[in-house]
Amino acid sequence: MSRRRRIYEGKAKVLYEGPEPGTLIQHFKDDATAFNAKKHQVIEGKGVLNNRISEYLFQHLNDIGVPTHFIRRLNMREQLIREVEIVPLEVVVRNVAAGSLSQRLGIEEGTQLPRSIIEFYYKNDQLNDPMVSEEHITAFGWATPQEIDDIMALAIRNEMMRIIVADEISPDSCRLWDIKSNEKLDKDRFRRDLGGLLEAYTEVAKRLGILIENERPAGSGPVLSGILDPQGKAIEGALKSLGVDGIASVRQGKVFDIELAATDKAKAEAALKAAADKLLANTVIENYRVEVLS
């Protein structure tokens, strides 16, 4: 990434110029912050998990027709995204009492709200992201009344709008509780000094089906699978629509045909494995197989 111009760096992500006009590369850092960065810690592997969880959710939103900035994942920490003009608002959709709402109104955390409540906060770290009303938003030109309507409709009903969903969707930006135990699986573990943030995020990834169950060596960070394969899904759907029976699933992969000067099979296999490990495969999230043909 050092060869690309850095556009912006926030608390948890860095934006670099993209390969084409109108695109950016979004890099996920390992930084955990709370209370507008007054609390800060670097947690190895957090950025990898947030990148994959965010990719998974954005891709599913794209698949059901909700417009987003997400184009594709590039590697374990980076995504290719569309450049957008960000509305300087944090839009919070509350269905269950938690956090500041419980503190402000004295409602016990976990209480089901009578209906979804949408709150707006002005994104400004120096001001600690104050809550604002629709009157503030329109008066100061942060968004038009129509854009506010679009934001609210998109947040509640996931309708197609000219407002699109951007930034990230991860345990950093959601409240995620286990439905049976109410165990927190989000950034509240860091905010409230509960510990186990990486384990909680890992559990979220596992429940979404993007975490390999194999035990990983200590200190290696998360080992992820479940690579999205839209081409494979499209082929699967086309085959089924054509009446081809017995198709359970289709995966599309990559094949590299490499000609080596080495005549020793063991040396050739070692060279191919080195090429895969160093360049051809992202071994954090991909598996590969080497075949030496005489």
Image (cartoon, rainbow, N blue to C red):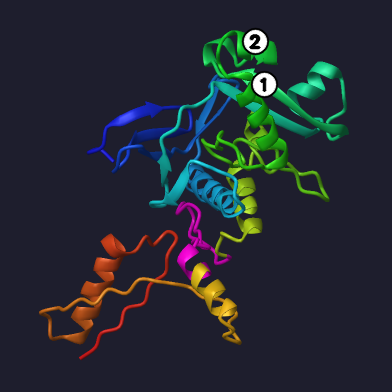
Residue 272 sits in quarter = bottom left
Tell me which secondary structure the magenta stretch mostly adopts: loop
Front residue of this view, candidates 288 and 92: 92
Label whose residue precedes the other's in the sequence (2 or 1): 1
Q: Nearer the viewer, mark 2 or mark 1?
A: 2
Image quadrant containing the N terminus = top left
Q: Which residue is mark 2?
A: 136
Disc 2 on helix, strand or loop? helix
> The magenta stretch spans which residues?
213-233
> Looking at the image, which residue is at 51% across and 51% down?
52
Q: Position of residue 185 (x, y in %)?
A: 68, 44
In this orientation, which residue lies closer to the viewer: 274 or 116? 116
**Residue 120 shows which numbered tag?**
1
User: In the visual, does 110 lie left or right of 268?
Assistant: right
Residue type at mark 2?
Answer: His
For the residues labelled 2 and 1, say whether their Cβ atoms are less than 8 Å apart: yes
Query: Is 210 located above or below residue 165 in the figure?
Result: below
Pointer 2 local density, CA inside 10 Å: few below 14, some 14–19, many at least 20: some
- Determine which quarter of the picture holds residue 273: bottom left
Q: Does residue 25 appear in the picture of this structure?
A: yes
Q: Position of residue 119 (x, y in %)?
A: 71, 23
| Residue type indicated by callout 1 | Phe
Residue at 19% from the left image edge and 79% from the top image edge: 267
